[in-house]
Image: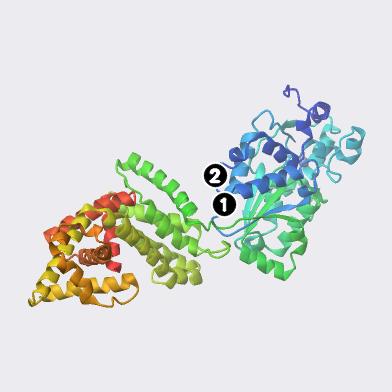
Amino acid sequence: MVTQDIRTLGDYVEKARNDSRLKRTTHSYIADMFQHYSPLEIFPNLRANKRQVGLVSQYFLGSANFGSLAERLLLLLGPQGVGKTTLCNDLKQSLVTYCKTDQGLAYAVAGCPFHQHPFDVLGAEDRGKHGLVWHQEAGPCPVCEKSLEQYGGWEQMPVTRFYYGPRSGIADHTAVDQRREDITEFLGDVDYSMVLKAKGSKSNPEAYDWAGKFVWANRGILDWDEILKSRRQLMTSLLMLTQSKAIAYPKFPKLHADIAIIGATNYGEYDLALKDNVLEPLFGRAFVVGFRYILDAKEEAEITKLRARQMQQYSKFKDDKSVLCINEAVLREYLAKLIVNSRMPEGESGLSPRVTLDIFSNAYMNATRKNAPCISFDQYRDSYEFVLSSELHKNKDLADKFSIDSKLAQQVTKEFFDQLWKTVAEKICATSDEFKRMGQNKYIEYLSVLERQSRGEELSQRDKELSAAVAHYLNTESQKQIQDQEAFERIFIVRLDEYKKQHYTQIERLRGPINNIVSSNIRTILKNYSYNEELHDKDRVLVNELTSAFGQAISGCRHCADGLLRFIGENL
Ligand SMILES: [Zn+2]
Ligand SMILES: [Zn+2]
């Protein structure tokens, strides 16, 4: 579509007859953008927040064409690090991209500090004459008012293509320190160097700098973080901007502004404010999009994995070395679980995903510094303690609850241990040839104890222990006392040679007890291993075999398998 020949407001009004792009309010413009791009194109960084993205799309689509949602503040509610800031940034970035496209065409009155929409300057009467349906209250700003005089009416006033960018339809504010939230930050201030030139009048628009966040945000987005920490006076201004689309100036008439305001706050502040009831008018005008922390350890670990990949790529690029193995079991079952448990039960508070990433980054950096092929479990635990020591200053209750020796942390550690030990005991030991060989040796040894006992020979301490262990496991397995131990043993003695030829796994009554005895031996070996005690050659072979098989079972390398086996040993 030809647009180059729009130079004046007269041209604009003429062209606007047949071009709906020129008739858009702020919300209509953004709504069109939501139809032009897919949600993923607008919010490429919010894959995990489909629901919130959907709600925000609906908000803008429902606010087009003077829909009532255009008079609502969009309030993003949720704890730190859930994507509220990312959502705003993605939205702003999309506006910057969209306004450069053909569909994103927009104009502003040239030289207007508010980059006013051309229709604003006409005033209600002239708009009526030209059949333009627009904001009732819209009129020229004080600067445009001056230009109107200069150009002898609106027809000849120049217009220019409007592009979104910082201070051009995009402004943001974070309420941190109320004392520094001066209203001039939002409205602009008298420019004293200009007062003289502007014939001494402070209410002369030429003596005003118009450098304020409300001014910059006109036609676009005002992104207001920690909104409930702002001064009441500002809240009233925001309410007015939302509801009446107006800015009150001390020295100028009330000014029309068309801004989509996006506020953000957390559940704690929100609940307090609801109780206060003072902010009811503003809240009554809010469309709330709630965010919660992820409560699924698997999802939380996925986020860390993305960062891991990025760190791996970069350290490979920069130093030509990198941590080769990122053990997913540790990420998911230990680290992510600790963090996710801090957010129970509602996901409204707790440790932010940033904490997970900080722990991971710290562990990663330490591992590369040590030239380790992977991040050991101990390293994760050290990094967890390190990062949490910083969190402790920010949120004492939470950090105490999740310090490394807290009950909750111990619970997660125990569950992790149980899971690992189950893998070792059931998946590895029970299927390993080494294990079966050890079992068979024990079985033969047991039969020979029975044989010597039946001959009336004196039994050694080791013999007695083995015999007692078999009896013990027989009883625990059958859940009731074996009535007659001697009768049970006699079965084997009578046909000793026959039994010696069999494999213990074929002997139903002894299979369980022998497996248990071998497992218990392995426990002892692992315990000794974790305390760095000298191992017998035979045991060392076993540990080696376990390490390889365990590494495979948890899809990790030998290095992390070794660390986890030691962790198991410590806790057995
Ligand atoms: Zn203006
Ligand atoms: Zn590894």
In which quarter of the view is residue 534 placed? bottom left
Gap in angstroms between the C-alphas marked 2 and 1: 8 Å
User: Mark 2 falls on what kind of element?
Assistant: loop
Amino acid tagged 1: Gly
Colour mapping used in the image: rainbow
Q: Mark 1 points at which residue?
A: 83
Circle 1 packing at 10 Å, graded few (<14), some (14-19), many (20+), is many
User: Mark 1 falls on what kind of element?
Assistant: loop
Quadrant of the image containing the N terminus: top right
Quadrant of the image containing the C terminus: bottom left
Labelled pair 2, 1 in contact (Cβ < 8 Å): yes
Q: Mark 2 points at which residue?
A: 45
Q: Which of 437 and 338 is in front in this view?
A: 437
Q: Nearer the viewer, residue 274 or 151?
A: 274
Amino acid tagged 2: Asn
Q: Does the residue labelled 2 lie within 8 Å of ligand 2?
A: no
